Image (spheres, grey):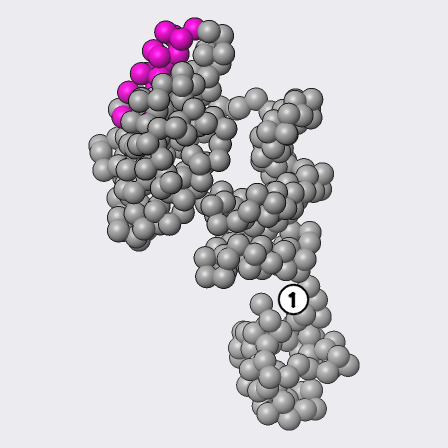
Amino acid sequence: MPISTVIREKRRELGMTQEQVAERLGVSAPAVNKWERGNTCPDIMILPALARLLETDVNTLLCFREELTDQEIAAACEEVVKEANENGIDAGSDFAEKKIREYPNCMKLMYSLNTTLEGLLILGRAEITEEECRRYEEKIFARYEFILDHAAEERMRNSAAYMLVGRYMRQGDCRRAEELLDLLPQREADKRILQANVLSEQGKHSEAARILEGKILGDINEVHIALIKLMTLVMDEGREEDAEEIAKIGQKTAEAYGLWGYNSILIPMELAVRQQDVRESVRYIREMIQAAKKPSTMPDIPLYRHISQQKKDDQRGDKAETEHNMEKILPVLLKELKTDPRYVFLRGDEEFQELIGE
């Protein structure tokens, strides 16, 4: 909040006019008006008297704060997304770094901006070079390391450690990944069921149902991720028939629990690629590309009735969601299909070349 706003709001809280403030401080009313409009700032010599008059302190006047509110942090994240969408990821990253320098000790701000930038980087990989991507990733994970070492809140340190485990795994540094895993607590009892019980007893059935639906959706996404990893491990062990059975279970689970169509194709496509089955791989790739062109909105099924309605109220609509997927998700998928060594065996297939636009 700029000093002009602080002066105006504090004056109004005390029920004073600009003329009264001017008279008490020995300045002109137009001078006070200019302060509040942000055209000029009070002289440094007058700040202590101004702070006492407005029943505050100089630090508050000058906005010297260590922390930001949740609303201010959310607004900063929205601004980063806006900058990145309008002017490129460089602009979004620059805005985030400027905000972090402004509030260097606000760990929640740093973490929130970091996760926002990471999401933008994932969606924007198709638009930048690998070298640029590595440069952004280095900055992002350096901040996670800083949060891990300096955040006072245990939950935030754990979140940073969780993000870093994946990074060190990708780098092949399993020793450091294990060290970080040892810092993380085993999952404690999920309080959401108890919350739902309490709300239900109070007659707040819709709120209780919304909590349970969110828990189910979150849990089933974790199960789906675990099934993908389990299938790849089983393939590594040479148990191909078991891997095929796990892939069927994963696909049925995704369909039964209403996961986005894109997600339901991930497991069978991964299996086909691991088996280097050209025809099945191409078939699933085609289905994934088609799914990426459809909205990733919440399924309107009884299992998620309450949260799907909330999403409908909040979201931009299926058309905008489809445009977002085609603008962000589809280019990332196509870039991966073109560059990832796992798909080399498909390069000689005409249908595959046509699908990826080559």
Does the magenta stretch mainly form a helix, a strand or a loop? helix
Q: Amino acid at mark 1?
A: Cys
On the picture, is 69 further left or further right than 262? right
Dividing the picture into quadrants, the one containing residue 204 is top left
The answer to whether residue 265 is above or below residue 9 is above
Which residues lie in the magenta part? 239-255
Q: Secondary structure at mark 1?
A: loop
Which of the pair 343/259 is nearer the observer? Answer: 343
Residue found 55% across the figure and 47% down from its top: 129
Q: Position of residue 342 (x, y in %)?
A: 47, 26
Q: Quadrant of residue 7?
A: bottom right
Can residue 198 be seen in this snapshot?
no
Magenta span has 355?
no
Q: Which residue is the site of mark 1?
A: 63
Using residue 192 as the reference point, say whether residue 174 is left or right of it. Answer: right
In the displayed image of the protein, which residue is found farthest to the right? 45
